[in-house]
Amino acid sequence: MGAGMERGGVKWTRDVLQEAVTASTNMSQVLRHLGLDVVGGHHTHISRRIKTYGIDTSHFTQVVRTERQRDNRRRRTADEILTVLTSGPASRVPGARLKRAMREKGVAERCALCGAEGVWLGEPLPLEVDHIDGDWRNNRLENLRLLCPNCHSTTDRYRGRGTRRARERAS
């Protein structure tokens, strides 16, 4: 058990926190100085304790994002989204992102099967992205279509339906 802590739960004293703050230039360094993982829960808890004790942090420096970190937040273009995911354990592209890319490429906001538009009885009708071949990694525009929830639920591969049978036939 580290200095400044009690057994009934972690209790950080003013002296321990003051020492950590004085030796650091940002909250992440404070956490490392205290031997804590740099995660949100610790950050929140220790920040509150420091504020409660009124410990001065005016010497802390602003965290500067690197060019790579800024680039990671860049909005991907439709062409970057509408591709086949091939590398390793690919993660599914959210439907809202696929819909935006499809709209940017000129796909009409209506069900490809029944023609229903994005409104039903005066209420918004959330059109869903359907992968025609059933492969969620294949995000090419020609493999995607917008369907109303009713038409989408009638497809052979709706929400993974039929994928086990398809795999069994393939083997």
Image (cartoon, grey):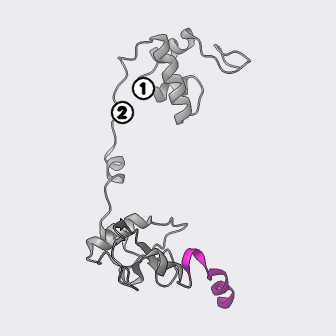
> In the drawing, what numbered circle is on residue 18?
none
State the image quarter where residue 63 is shown: top left
- The front one of 71 and 42 is 42
Residue carrying label 1: 26
The reply to whether callout 1 and callout 2 are in contact (CB within 8 Å) is: yes
User: Does residue 163 belong to the magenta stretch?
Assistant: yes
Query: At 57% across and 13% down in the image, what residue appears?
Result: 16
Q: Main secondary structure of the magenta part?
A: helix
> In the drawing, what numbered circle is on residue 63?
2
Left or right of 18? Residue 121 is left
Amino acid type for the residue under numbered disc 2: Val
Residue extending farthest right: 7
Rendered-image quadrant of the N terminus: top right
- What x and y, as percent, mark residue 53? 49, 11
Q: Determine whether 129 is above or below 155 in the image.
A: above
- What x and y, as percent, mark residue 58? 35, 17
For mark 2, give the secondary structure: loop
Rendered-image quadrant of the C terminus: bottom right
**Which range is magenta?**
157-171
- What x and y, as percent, mark residue 97? 38, 64
State the image quarter where residue 80 is shown: bottom left
Left or right of 163? Residue 18 is left
Query: At 51% across and 13% down in the image, what residue appears?
Result: 19
Query: At 44% across and 64% down in the image, what residue appears?
Result: 94
User: Does residue 9 belong to the magenta stretch?
Assistant: no
For mark 1, give the secondary structure: loop
Q: Determine whether 57 is above or below 83 in the image.
A: above
- What x and y, as percent, mark residue 8? 73, 18
Distance Cα–Cα, label 1 vs label 2: 8 Å
